[in-house]
Amino acid sequence: MIEPGELGAEGTEGGQFLAEVLAGLTAPRKALSPKWLYDARGSALYELICGVKEYYPARTELAILDRHAGEMAAEVGPRALVFEFGSGSGQKTERLLSALEDPVAYLPVDISREALLRAAAGLARRFPRLDIRPVVGDFTNGVVLPDAGLSSGRRLSFFPGSTIGNFDPADAVSLMSRMAAVAGAEGALLIGVDAPKDAATLERAYDDAERITAAFDLNLLTRMNRELGADFPLSGFRHRALWNGRLSRVEMHLVSVRDQVVHVGGVPISFRSGESIHTESAYKWDMHAFDALAALAGWRPVRSWADERAWFSVRLYLAAGGRDRGGQLRRGGPT
Ligand code: AVI
């Protein structure tokens, strides 16, 4: 098995978790980055969420890939170098790699070492001739890929799962700009984007009846207790999902059920009853608005594939100013 590379000090978790938690919980509106939801148990719970009936994004995107991966691969061309920020379960990557013509390498980057190794091992069994170079690190903080010595066709940034929705718009532009820099002049971006829909469907998707999403959210308290010596009582908080139509996002919150004081790293943090920690936003993007967002990051739309209800789309962009497969400069909008 491939040993994963590590990012430098900038990318290690170390004291960064404590520093971010203290900053987030002493702010006027308590909030934490959703990236901390993904320890080993959090990653495993997220995989379970992808199977619950209320959580439509995962299966809808997989169906789009099943149906259209061949067309996506034809647009990307042969000998692609695929990099993926966040490695997920590898299921969607498997669909893409199977369709691509003679891909040269796959470089997944993930903050969770366990999830990264599991996904990379599965893909290595499935694609024994593919050069797989996993990197443990925080792609929200800057990443240099270990791609020395690799010559390839297009560099393709694969970002499925509507994970882009977990970034505020300005951060989403920064992240897609970073992808554009890594992908280079002939680069491509294939990205999963979830669209706005009725509030009830969205809130159920993030608060399923089996309470798996609640366990995923509450696991952040368990993680802080274990890794930071915090003393959050699990019974003192409940999970809540709400659709914020004004900002076009579903928000996850851990709501304090009473007035209480919790300690993190010896620092007392007071909660009023009903006060919450905002643990995740999942922005739902109108497709035209998303194309405009991607343009700010240097990407021009080429083509997109959606389900019948247009609930979710997988969108292909090329580096603005780059060339299409026929060697011609492309200026048009999406087909
Ligand atoms: C990883 N990400 C795209 C998921 C989402 O839909 O925002 C995380 C998630 N949170 C709750 N359910 C799923």
Image: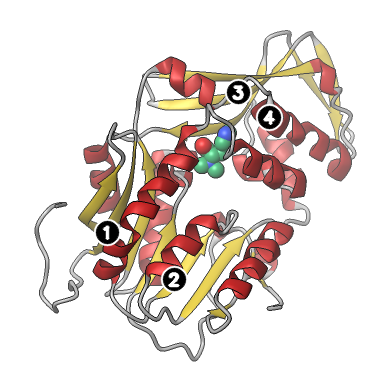
Mark 1 or mark 3: whose residue is earlier in sequence: 3
Question: How many neighbours does mark 4 have within 10 angstroms: few (below 14), some (14-19), or many (20 or more)?
Answer: some
What amino acid is labelled 2 in the image? Val
Residue 318 place in picture, x, y as percent: 25, 64
Judging from the image, what secondary structure is the residue with disc 3 in?
A: loop
From the viewer's perspective, is residue 327 above or below residue 317?
below
Mark number for residue 212?
A: 4
From the viewer's perspective, is residue 6 above or below residue 297?
below
Left or right: 112 in relation to 292 = right
Of residue 287 and residue 140, the one placed in the foreground of this image is 287
Mark 4 and mark 3 in contact (Cβ < 8 Å)?
yes
Question: How many neighbours does mark 2 have within 10 angstroms: few (below 14), some (14-19), or many (20 or more)?
Answer: many
Q: CA distance from mark 2 to mark 1?
A: 14 Å
Q: Is mark 1 within 8 Å of ligand 1?
A: no
Residue beneath the point at 66% across and 34% down: 24
What amino acid is labelled 4 in the image? Ile
Asked if residue 1 can be seen in this view, the reply is yes
What amino acid is labelled 1 in the image? Tyr
Mark 1 and mark 4 in contact (Cβ < 8 Å)?
no
Q: Which residue is mark 2?
A: 82
Left or right: 327 in relation to 141 = left
Mark number for residue 208?
A: 3
Judging from the image, what secondary structure is the residue with disc 1 in?
A: strand
Q: Quadrant of ligand 1?
A: top right
